[in-house]
Amino acid sequence: MKAEDIDFYNLGFEFIETETMYVVDYKEGTWSEGKLVPFGSFEISPGACILNYGQGIFEGMKALKTKDGEIVLFRPGENAKRLNESAERMLIPSYDEETFIEAVKQVVKANKQYVPPADSGGALYIRPIIIGNGPILGVAPAKEYKLIIFTVPVGPYFPEGFKGIDLEISLKYTRAAPGGTGYAKTCCNYAGTMKPAKETKEKGFAQIIYLDAVHKRYIDEVGTANFFAVIDGKLATPKLTGTILPGITRKSVLELASRELGMDIEERDISYEEVFEDRCTEAFCTGTAAVITPIASITLNEKKRVFNNREPGEITVKLYDLLTGIQRLEKEDKYGWVVKVE
């Protein structure tokens, strides 16, 4: 779609084709030199490892436009690092992190006309993927791989925007188990979440809260986002034990809460019983797509907890303002998190 045909002020979180993508191939033990090409389809063998065994990983990033018209990225080095951590788990060749960041900049520049205006609240979503496109018959890693980086202009992930969402705790489904691939951003982790999400949305909820696979008591993730709660005045989030994604927004929120708000932070097991107690005063979820999204209510069977009369809590608002302010350079970037594209 041509950029001039897009209503940037009414974007959802849906696929819109842009003009240019970045492509690199891995053959005979080395990555080729990457290049920008017109966005389009490519051929793949029916025997490709990605098609037969799901050997693929991806990242989620955003390019934002500031009020001054600059285009910026938020902590792209963290995405490069996490991509390689996922690659290691899935036996995919690593990709040089500095080269990755430069590749992201190139594809954003090539599609800069698709970056929504600062006052629209939208962003240019960046999707890097690496797939095992070489054919394989036995269960083994591919010998050939393809890295593709493409972009899509998007609005808020949750249509509600910065308003509270209603979530349901699942006692039926789990997302990941200890020793598995829960911490890796691999394609196969997400296919299994589609059915639980569909079922909970049919009941009027925005997403599902997954519990740990062992005890079915401790909170893991909110669908495709990390979970936070303010409990006893402290900011708590599930600890990284290999079953949840180590979110970059999650990491940033923990630093902001500690350094800017002076809060005590806890990375620990959070039982679902705790969120129904009065000492839990706020809850929200975080992610590249979700940013910081307030949680209005949590339901388990017939039990429901409503937070702050469905309004975002004080801590949630402060963290949202801090994070988004830094991301768009409206607040001082003390931490060197923002990288200018040009």
Image (tube, rainbow, N blue to C red):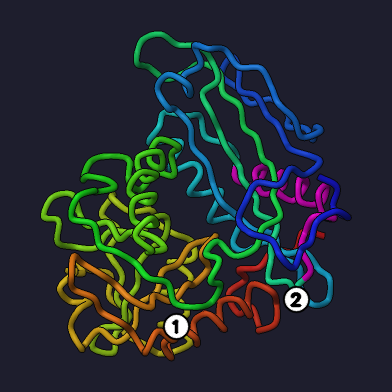
Residue under pointer 1: 316
In the picture as drawn, the residue positioned furthest to the top comes out as: 137
Residue 234: % across, % down: 29, 85
Residue 258: % across, % down: 40, 82
**Residue 110 lies in the magenta-colored region:** yes
Q: Is residue 325 left or right of residue 92?
A: right
Disc 1 on helix, strand or loop? helix
Residue under pointer 2: 119
- Residue pictured at 48% horizontal, 87% vertical: 260
- Report the quarter where the N terminus lies: top right
Residues in magenta? 97-117
Q: Earlier in the sequence, mark 1 or mark 2?
A: 2
Q: CA distance from mark 1 to mark 2?
A: 21 Å
Please name the amino acid that badge 1 sits on: Thr
Q: Is residue 316 above or below residue 2?
A: below
Label drawn at residue 24: none
Please name the amino acid that badge 2 sits on: Asp
Q: Is residue 125 above or below residue 250?
A: above
